[in-house]
């Protein structure tokens, strides 16, 4: 109405960004005709002027009728026609100004040498947590790479370490390798990680004849991933410029469990918890939207909540939202706005000097509506895309400032829906694998040892370790043999079932359990 009544000669664009649904798009047919009239329910007719243009930007046209489609000009964008190179060329211009021309050439060569072979290999050989485009994976790489360059960006400032040219060269090469593994390779599941590990080591060693090492590369055997373990087990430690295992990030002092802690609230530090905290710290401090994807019981929500509660209260305001199948867009907007203050007309944010961290758990749970869209996710996508949404009462524009987005979800399937790629393209995806045997043994042995130290006989310590191994064997046998079928659809086992057995045993106090045989009988009862 405002545009139609405007008398200026300027071009006016109205952008409809989001999924097309069959009801409102049919009501637009009269506008899209040659006479350009919008007929409202009240009987009012708004005549569009010649300066007004409409643009629709949906992911697909599943719900649009041929009558609508024929009234629009179509432009279909194929991801592989664009490719990731234009993004890379723009990205190279945003690198820190402290890098000289030689460094720029090294980064450019690293992209050309490593990125395309990795994308091709993943497409052919690996299964991903969910479908995505190569451009999204390349964008993830760029965002993570930029977030790790603080030391280079701070060069020349007081109070920061100075780096030699050789050190900067090592930094940019090793950080690129690390970023590539945790952007392009982080969405791979299961055995695909082992295949990618072998392929990537061969590629960076320069022995792959199809993709020879570029002349500018200064990678040697001493500054690539160590041979022991997998490439996923290491991170690049800037102090000393060495590759270290994730376990080196664990603070040994914090590993001791307080005597009065609740068993259900314990977080045992492992390589996985250290890794998750590292990415949370990196992305939250650089305001990069992040999503953890992993199966139930891998500690996504627990570790993230624990991290958010430990953030300094004078800098951050956490806001945790749990999505369910019944969550609506209105509820989502209200919960996020409830923690924000009005700074001035149309601008909302946390109190000045603070940042609000919005954590959305189970992001893919909201049910799809009749036409296949998920309104809460479309609302979040609008905010991540345009940094604003609209007031529900008077439709005025509300800009959001200093709000950081992180989320977690399980892989799609079994009540969880596939999320539109237009949402996931904003998020850096960190895949969390199910724990291996050594991690599970470490977690549950620590808990059992802590419990049996409370006045139990010393023989219980030995029995505790045997009990964890025995539970693991039963758990693995159950996973292998009791497969879900249509009649037994509840045969889905995860770490929560394992922990329930251990928690059941922890309920017995030392006064009631003096013999080892009683413990074995209790274990059989719990495991059964």
Image: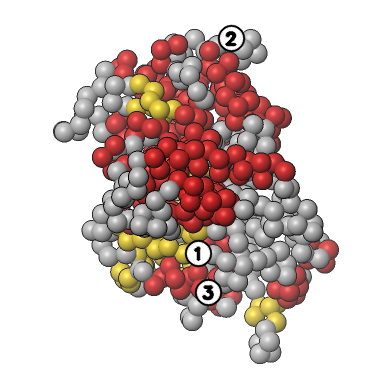
User: Can you give x and y, in whole percent of width and height, for residue 172 in the image?
Assistant: 39, 24
Q: CA distance from mark 2 to mark 1?
A: 48 Å
- State the residue position of label 1: 322
SS of the residue under disc 2:
loop
- State the residue position of label 3: 330
- State the residue position of label 2: 207
The residue closer to the viewer here, 133 or 437, is 437
User: Can you give x and y, in whole percent of width and height, for residue 99 in the image?
Assistant: 34, 25
In the picture, which quadrant includes the N terminus? Answer: bottom right
Which image quarter: residue 98? top left
Q: CA distance from mark 1 to mark 3?
A: 14 Å
SS of the residue under disc 3:
helix
Q: Is residue 520 above or below residue 332?
A: above
Mark 3 / mark 2, whichever is N-terminal? 2
Q: Nearer the viewer, mark 1 or mark 3?
A: 1
Q: Residue furthest bottom?
A: 42
Few, some or many residues within 10 Å of mark 1 (<14, 14–19, 20+): some
Q: Residue at x 31, y 50 (%)?
A: 454
Q: Is residue 131 above or below residue 203?
A: below
Colour logic: secondary structure
Q: Is residue 143 above or below residue 203?
A: below
């Amino acid at each position: 109405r405002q545009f139609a009544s405007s008398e200026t000669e300027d071009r006016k664009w109205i952008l409809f960004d989001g999924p097309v649904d069959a009801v409102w798009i049919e009501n637009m047919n009269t506008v899209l005709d040659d006479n350009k009239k919008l007929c409202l329910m009240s009987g009012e007719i708004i005549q569009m002027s010649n300066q007004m243009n409409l643009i629709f930007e949906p992911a697909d046209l599943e719900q649009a009728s041929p009558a609508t489609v024929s009234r629009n000009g179509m432009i279909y964008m194929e991801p592989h026609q664009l490719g990731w190179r234009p993004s890379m060329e723009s990205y190279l211009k945003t690198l820190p100004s402290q890098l000289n021309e030689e460094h720029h050439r090294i980064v450019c060569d690293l992209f050309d040498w490593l990125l395309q072979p990795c994308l091709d290999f993943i497409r052919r050989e690996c299964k991903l947590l969910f479908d995505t485009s190569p451009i999204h994976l390349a964008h993830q790489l760029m965002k993570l790479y930029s977030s790790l360059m603080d030391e280079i960006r701070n060069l020349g400032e007081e109070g920061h370490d100075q780096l030699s040219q050789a050190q900067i060269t090592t930094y940019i090469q090793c950080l690129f390798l690390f970023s590539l593994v945790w952007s392009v390779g982080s969405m791979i599941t299961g055995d695909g990680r082992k295949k990618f590990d072998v392929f990537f080591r061969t590629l960076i060693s320069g022995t792959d004849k199809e993709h020879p090492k570029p002349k500018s590369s200064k990678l040697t055997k001493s500054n690539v991933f160590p041979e022991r373990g997998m490439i996923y087990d290491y991170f690049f430690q800037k102090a000393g410029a060495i590759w270290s295992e994730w376990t080196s990030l664990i603070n040994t002092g914090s590993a001791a469990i307080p005597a009065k802690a609740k068993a259900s609230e314990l977080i045992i530090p492992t390589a996985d918890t250290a890794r998750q905290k590292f990415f949370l710290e990196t992305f939250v401090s650089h305001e990069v939207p992040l999503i953890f994807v992993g199966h139930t019981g891998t500690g996504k929500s627990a570790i993230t909540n624990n991290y958010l509660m430990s953030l300094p209260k004078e800098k951050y305001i956490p806001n945790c939202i749990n999505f369910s199948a019944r969550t609506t867009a209105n509820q989502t907007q209200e919960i996020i706005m409830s923690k924000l203050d009005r700074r001035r007309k149309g601008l909302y944010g946390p109190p000045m000097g603070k940042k609000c961290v919005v954590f959305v758990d189970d992001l893919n749970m909201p049910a799809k509506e009749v036409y296949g869209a998920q309104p809460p996710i479309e609302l979040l996508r609008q905010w991540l895309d345009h940094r604003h949404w609209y007031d529900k009462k008077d439709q005025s524009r509300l800009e959001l400032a200093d709000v950081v987005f992180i989320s977690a979800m399980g892989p799609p399937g079994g009540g969880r829906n596939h999320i539109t790629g237009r949402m996931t393209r904003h998020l850096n995806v960190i895949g969390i694998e199910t724990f291996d045997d050594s991690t599970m043994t470490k977690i549950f042995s620590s808990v059992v040892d802590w419990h049996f130290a409370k006045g139990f006989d010393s023989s219980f310590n030995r029995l505790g370790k045997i009990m964890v191994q025995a539970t693991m064997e039963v758990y693995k046998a159950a996973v292998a043999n009791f497969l879900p079928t249509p009649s037994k659809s509840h045969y889905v086992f995860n770490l929560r079932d394992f922990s329930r057995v251990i928690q059941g045993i922890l309920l017995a106090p030392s006064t009631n359990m003096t013999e080892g045989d009683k413990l074995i009988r209790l274990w059989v009862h719990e495991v059964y």
